[in-house]
Amino acid sequence: MSTRDIPRSDTKLWEKVTDSQVIAILIVSIILTGVIVGPIAYWIGNGAGYNTGYQVGNPDYIKIQLNVRAVETSYVGLLQQALDKMADVSQNKSVKVPTAGFDTLASIFNFSSKASDVWLQDQRLCNQTDMMHFNNTATLTGHPNITIAYQNACKVYPLLANDFFAFPNADLLPTLSSHFTDLVFNLMKLDNTISEDP
């Protein structure tokens, strides 16, 4: 086939990317970051004396904390992207189903994505008031999987937040990476559930 036979389009490549492709790309990038950052943080932590734990006067403690914060900053940034994507999906869904509360879910995701740490994201997304809004949308759409997916994500958020509070402890780094991956998958399940037609 010659180049003359190749159909051309004025549409830019990024405009052709579907929501499911964006989600797949986001999941792959998050998993790769977790796979790469987790072992590096573990190695840095052990090299900096992580296994000695916190001791008053330990000169490596500040270095350890900086490494932990770098990992958290990376994870928080990726979670913010996921929450922003879910806000967009919910807002688009509210146009199609205007009376089902998807606009409220979009606001919740937007507010949560502005949080600067995992603990604050958990507090903003997974509270009784927000649970009521997710239950309301599930009831109005006849789609109970919205509540189930929301609850599954909210079960993992505090685990990840507690992992960061538990440092310094090198043994927790693999657990942290595991909880992060679980949270991302649960958020993507929630995103997919919201995307589905009720």
Image (spheres, rainbow, N blue to C red):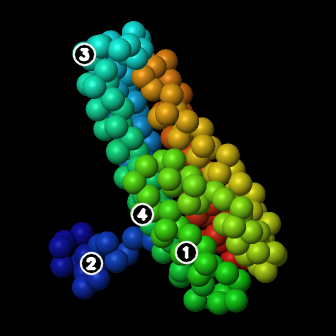
Residue where numbered disc 2 is placed: 12
Residue where numbered disc 4 is placed: 114
Residue where numbered disc 1 is placed: 106
Q: In the displayed structure, would residue 149 be above or below residue 59?
A: below
Q: Residues within 10 Å of mark 1 (few under 14, many from 20)?
A: many
Name the spot of residue 149 as percent of width and height, x first.
69, 57
SS label for mark 1: helix
* Whether residue 89 can be seen here: no
Q: Residue at x 53, y 80 (%)?
A: 91
Task: Determine whether, in the image, residue 138 is placed left or right of residue 116.
Answer: right
Lower position in the chain sequence, tag 1 or tag 2: 2
Name the spot of residue 102 as percent of width and height, x first.
63, 79
Which residue occupies the foreground of this view, 75 or 118? 118
Lower position in the chain sequence, tag 4 or tag 3: 3
Name the spot of residue 53 as percent of width and height, x first.
42, 14
- The three-letter code of the residue at mark 1 reads Ala
